[in-house]
């Protein structure tokens, strides 16, 4: 049997238009969200949207609640370090904090979009930050950093207080 012209045409006629229309729907929703953000004409999408287009048009927006005790969903795990603590010492301290204990083996640390120390290809470039004090890297006495690790399910926010 194998692949025949009739089978190929059936696939092309039924699946390919669905792919194009799905991409168009997603692109339209993205453009709509951009318009909401720029013009502030409406509240933006909070979390998740489900599109149902089988028998007409129906969209349902679901807002999932955040678990305040979840390390990934919470505003951040508080970590207080003494003044002058280096990034390397901070990373060692983070490994001992309760949500990370036994889950962090080789962490990477980001401050906003700026990598402070990253394992892998950027390690050589960011290694120079390891001896620097946290207050210098954060630009003050406190800040929120993101910690990632292969053993963590998602990046975790850490609220750092120096002093």
Image (tube, rainbow, N blue to C red):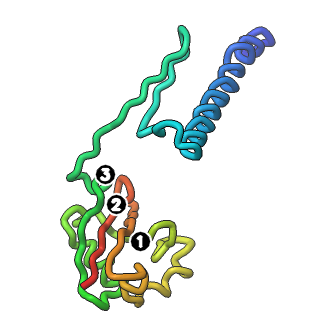
User: What percent of the width, then of the height, locates residue 75?
Assistant: 29, 58
Which of 2/125 is in front? 125
x and y, in percent, of residue 64 in the image: 32, 37
Question: Disc 1 and disc 3: Cα gap in Å?
Answer: 17 Å
The quarter of the image holding the N terminus is: top right
Q: Camera-side residue: 44 or 122?
A: 44
Chain-order first, disc 1 or disc 2: 1
- What residue appears at the point 71 percent right and 19 percent down from the top-left corner? 17
Q: Quadrant of residue 99?
A: bottom left
Residue 42 spot, x, y in % from top left: 49, 36
Q: Which residue is mark 3?
A: 73
Look at 58% across and 43% down and name the residue there: 39
The answer to which of marks 3 and 2 sits earlier in the sequence is: 3
Residue 76: give x, y in percent of width and height. 29, 61
SS for tag 3?
A: loop
- Mark 2 lies on a secondary structure that is strand
**In the image, 133: left or right of 113?**
left
Q: Residue at x 25, y 52 (%)?
A: 70
* Disc 1, SS: strand
Q: In the image shown, does 23 or 107 lie closer to the viewer?
A: 23
Mark 1 or mark 3: whose residue is earlier in sequence = 3
For disc 2, the marked residue is: 156
Side of 68 where 4 appears, left or right: right
Within 10 Å of the Cα at label 3, are there few (<14), some (14-19), or many (20+) other Cα atoms? some
Check contact, mark 1 vs mark 2: CB within 8 A. Answer: no
Mark 1: give few (<14), some (14-19) or many (20+) Cα within 10 Å.
many
Answer with left or right where residue 101 lies relative to residue 91: left
Residue that carries the numbered disc 1 in the rendered image: 109
Q: How far is the residue under mark 3 from the one under mark 2?
A: 8 Å
Q: Quadrant of residue 91?
A: bottom left
Q: What residue is at 56 percent from the left and 72 percent from the top? A: 121
């Amino acid at each position: 049997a194998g692949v025949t012209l009739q089978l190929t045409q059936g696939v092309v006629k039924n699946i390919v238009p669905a792919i194009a229309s799905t991409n168009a729907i997603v692109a339209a929703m993205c453009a709509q969200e951009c318009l909401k953000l720029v013009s502030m004409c409406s509240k933006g999408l909070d979390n998740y949207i489900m599109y149902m287009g089988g028998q007409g048009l129906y969209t349902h927006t679901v807002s999932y609640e955040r678990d305040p005790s979840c390390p990934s969903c919470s505003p951040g795990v508080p970590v207080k370090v003494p003044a002058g603590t280096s990034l390397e010492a901070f990373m060692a301290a983070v490994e001992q904090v309760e949500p990370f204990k036994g889950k962090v083996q080789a962490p990477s640390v980001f401050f906003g979009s700026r990598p402070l120390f990253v394992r892998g290809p950027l390690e050589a470039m960011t290694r120079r930050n390891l001896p620097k004090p946290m207050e210098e890297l954060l630009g003050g006495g406190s800040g929120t950093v993101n910690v990632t690790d292969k053993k963590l399910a998602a990046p975790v926010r850490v609220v750092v207080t120096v002093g």
